[in-house]
Amino acid sequence: MKKQIGRHLSFVECRESMGMGVGGGLAARATISESGMDVIVIAMGPGRRHITKPVCEITYALREEGIDTSVLVVNAGSGVPSDAPDMTTSTYFGLDPIEVERIQQYKVAIIHLGNVRQHIIYKARLILRNVDIPAIVVAQAPVDFEDFAAIGVKTVRVMPADEDINTRGEIKEIITGVIRGVTAPQDKLDEIVSKVQQVLPPRGGD
């Protein structure tokens, strides 16, 4: 017989490959760390420009509050989608079918993106075009619901015209000012936890 005293027990499945030196120890691209099926944090692949340190801190903060949180590091996380107007990068952002399948299993997605406004909105659109779950965008750059709705992304506050809707999933919340490669301040972590709790369906709910 097992008893727990004042602790929330979590089982964390190891990722498929070793962690990288850059990115706060976050695992290499194309890997997933599974811990329950409540929230999936989608992170760009680690690299010189895509420092993923805040993802580990966000994940830890959510797990401390008893929210089962897994992390998916996107295989093709750099660059922008092929249909984005800004194609100055030499790489394409995209999702593999297995990544779509994994994301769709969760109740809420936290999409952690970078500091280029145009890249952020088109990456989010590609993700939400492929999965039908509520999403919270966490970014460094200042973006708002109007930015996403303008390119056909469904959002809780601004909805594109019916003929312009280009996503299955919907953005429920946006948190900006989470800087790559810098320790996330406690007020930002508290804001993320609070907004996840608002979006996450009640235990035992649909």
Image: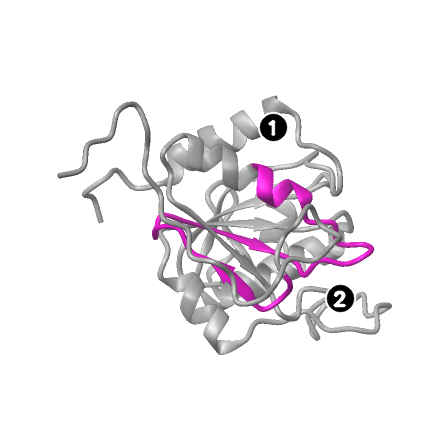
Instruction: Work out whether residue 165 can be spotted.
Output: no
Residue 189 magenta = no
Q: Position of residue 160 (x, y in %)?
A: 53, 54
Q: Which amino acid does label 2 sit on?
A: Gly
Label 1: state its secondary structure. Answer: helix
The answer to whether residue 100 is visible is: yes
Q: What stretch is highlighted in magenta?
A: 28-57
Q: Label 1: how many residues lie within 10 Å, few (<14), some (14-19) or many (20+)?
A: some
User: Mark 2 falls on what kind of element?
Assistant: loop
Rendering coords of residue 206 (x, y %): 22, 49
Q: What label does residue 79 carry, if any?
A: 2
Assign the N terminus to one quadrant of the image: top left
Residue at the farthest front position: 1
> Picture quarter containing residue 199?
top left
Q: Residue at x 18, y 43 (%)?
A: 204
Which residue is more in the foreground, 68 or 124?
68
Outermost residue, left direction? 1
Whole-percent x, y for residue 20 in the image = 70, 58
Classify 202 as above or below 149. above
**Which residue has dot 1 on it?**
188
- Determine the residue positioned at 60% across, 28% down: 188
Q: Which amino acid does label 1 sit on?
A: Lys
Q: For the point 47% across and 31% down, which residue is it?
A: 193
Is the image coloured rainbow, by chain, by secondary structure, or in one colour? one colour
User: Is residue 2 shown above or below 167?
Assistant: above
Which quadrant of the structure image shows residue 57? top right
**Residue 59, how many percent across, how many down?**
51, 41
Farthest residue, direction right: 88
The earlier-in-sequence mark between 1 and 2 is 2
